[in-house]
Image: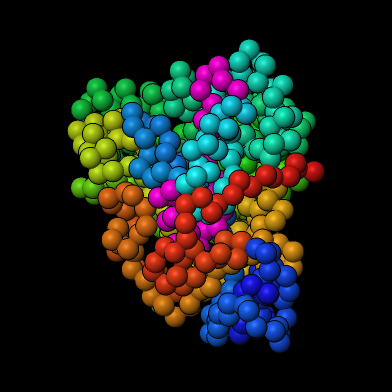
Amino acid sequence: MDLIIKNGTIVTSTESYMADIAVKDGKIAAIGSGFPEIGAEVVDAKGMLVLPGAIDAHTHLAMPFGGTISADSYLSGTRAAACGGVTTVFDYPMQRKGKGILETVEERKGMCDPEACVDYAFHCIITDLNDGTILDEFEAAVDNGITSFKCFLVYKKERMMVDDATLVKIMLKAKEVGAITNLHAENPDLIDLNIEQFLKEGKTSAWYHYLSRPEYVEAEADKRAVHLAKSINAPLYIVHMADKEGLEAAVAAKMDGHDILIETCPQYLEFTSDVYKREDGRNFVCSPPIKGQESQDALWKAIKVGTIDTVATDHCPFQSYEKDWGKEDFTKIPNGCAGIENLYPYMLSAANEGKISFNRAVELCSSNPAKIFGCTQKGSLTVGKDADIVIYDPNKDFTISVDNMHSDYDHTIWEGKTLHGYPIKTFVRGNLVYDNGDFVGKPGLGQFVKRERRK
Ligand code: URP
Ligand code: ZN
Ligand code: ZN
Ligand code: ZN
């Protein structure tokens, strides 16, 4: 054996039990006790929880967006991921108009591969059907391990946004080839209408970012998308769900047996729209914006009862000087916040405080994203799977500060938040990448995760 983690409590999505884990050649070779220790690195995890590494199913690394590029490169973003117990990161390569899927993904792979400190996968953003020819590429994309595509119903038509007809074509084709469509759902016409009105009235603070795209603006698009997916019987994964009404529509469809999956993010679980009234409100600007208390309560309820499927971060940080572009005009604030290093510690802290079980935290952050997106080697502490393992100290308190994070951004919305319990070690395929506060991995260790077709 190469590595033995002994005396810890193993936590899966369904059970918790005491056992030792033996790792050989990057895989979990055995789970039990009394493994011979000669020649192996032995970690005593007495009093600790032993968890599968998290999968952050939603990040934007080095993403051209909002007139700049998001602050974390593939190196700094995946380094931070490792230090937060995330062992697989999903990034969103964006098709430039007229380009193909495989060339889009290959270009990003070329950037990511030498830098990645944890394993990585791609959902490809489709912005242009290329007169329909891009649909012919879906099959090849799936063969190459890209089994999810993404559409934006918002942002500029010239760059990212697609209309309903395009979305339907993509959802149908994705279903045909055994893939799934991820969707950013907000109503662009209502946003434009509200922005025009606010700017005319000189209402330009970050609070008006929220008011230009409040609950009903997201809900309308969520409900429309759910209606379309149901009508054509295609799977749909709604990213960063933030509002109660849209959530309820998606949950109702799911309960009716439709293949609707729901993701939310820690920022929607922790903050309310009141943050946009703060002097530094622009730092919290993301889309969809953080909603009111009623929506937050509904999200937590769905987390508890099991109707939300995944929690991911939408990690897309920008530097303070970039956020400051919108000091006098909220429409100039680049959209997005940091979170990649906070996802697993935040959800595990919620478990430690008794809000949810540790098993549910593992399900939301690891086993469900693995299942939904076809990462068959990930998301579970089971013999034969990749040895992506986090050792978690339930008694270690940790207060988040930009100074103890491992990203490249210069501020974080999570500043000052105290978490109860914290990861102390992260292994990616048996390689130690994080050790008690320090990144100890290396760029290039991370490998592309070739995913399986959906059945
Ligand atoms: O504000 C956000 N979420 N920025 C990243 C792009 C997106 O919409 O996911
Ligand atoms: Zn989005
Ligand atoms: Zn996003
Ligand atoms: Zn504590």
Where does the image place residue 99, in percent across and percent down from the top left?
A: 56, 20
The mark total stands at 0
Q: Which quadrant of the figure contains the C terminus?
A: top right
Query: Can residue 94 be found in the magenta stretch?
Result: yes
**Horizontal side, residue 106 vs residue 434: left or right:** right
Placement of 202 over or under 30, stated as above or below: above
**Figure coloring:** rainbow
Q: Residue furthest top?
A: 131
Q: Is residue 246 visible?
A: no
**Horizontal side, residue 214 vs residue 300: left or right:** left
Front position in the image: 81 or 334: 81
**Horizontal side, residue 218 vs residue 196: left or right:** right
Residue at 66% of width from left, 80% of height from top?
20
Residue at 62% of width from left, 28% of height from top?
102
Q: Is residue 425 visible?
A: yes
Where does the image place residue 184, in percent across and percent down from the top left?
A: 53, 36
Residue at 59% of width from left, 74% of height from top?
50
Where does the image place residue 381, in percent across and percent down from the top left?
A: 67, 67
Query: Can residue 270 be found in the magenta stretch?
Result: no
Q: Residue furthest right?
A: 455
Placement of 156 over or under 343, stated as above or below: above
Q: Quadrant of residue 164?
A: top right
Front position in the image: 340 or 20: 20
From which residue to which does the magenta span run? 75-100
